[in-house]
Image (cartoon, grey):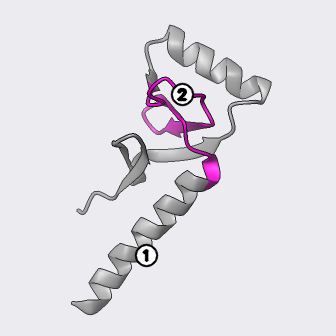
Amino acid sequence: MDVKLINIGFANFIAAHRLVSIVSPEPAPVKRLVKEAKEGGRLIDATSGRRTRAVLVMDSDHVILSALQPETVVNRAASEEGKLQTKEEKT
């Protein structure tokens, strides 16, 4: 099984198949989710001290903070998938 990684900024990567959702950090329910994850030791801060712009929810119940916009993470995930498909088509 090939593990597809998504660059979430500042040399941090996540396994694409473990990602459940990418959301904005602004809504109150997301803020509660982040707070509960922090209290439960399931929060991973990958912002390198910058402002949180995307919250990534993983299938392991971990919550990851990213300094990239949600759209940027989605575009990176889609472009990585496209690169892999192109490589597979060539072989």
Q: Which residues are magenta?
A: 45-71
Based on the picture, tell me whether residue 53 belongs to the magenta stretch. yes
- Seen at 52% across and 14% down, the residue is 38
Q: Using the image, tell me which numbered label, if any, was put on residue 50.
A: 2
Residue 13 spot, x, y in % from top left: 35, 45
x, y (%) of residue 73? 53, 52
Q: Amino acid at mark 1?
A: Gly
Q: Are marks 1 and 2 in contact (CB under 8 Å)?
A: no
Question: What residue lies at 23% left-to-right and 62% top-to-bottom?
Answer: 1
Q: Earlier in the sequence, mark 1 or mark 2?
A: 2
- Measured Cα–Cα span from mark 1 to mark 2: 29 Å
Q: Nearer the viewer, residue 29 or 24?
A: 24
In this rendering, position of residue 7 left or right of residue 69: left
Q: Is residue 56 above or below residue 41?
A: below
| Residue nearest the observer in this picture, 58 or 81 | 81
**Which residue is identified by label 1?**
82
Residue 82's image quarter? bottom left
**Element type at mark 2:** loop
- For residue 67, side relative to residue 53 (left or right): left
* Residue depth check, mark 1 versus mark 2: number of the one nearer the observer: 2
Check disc 2 and give the amino acid type.
Arg
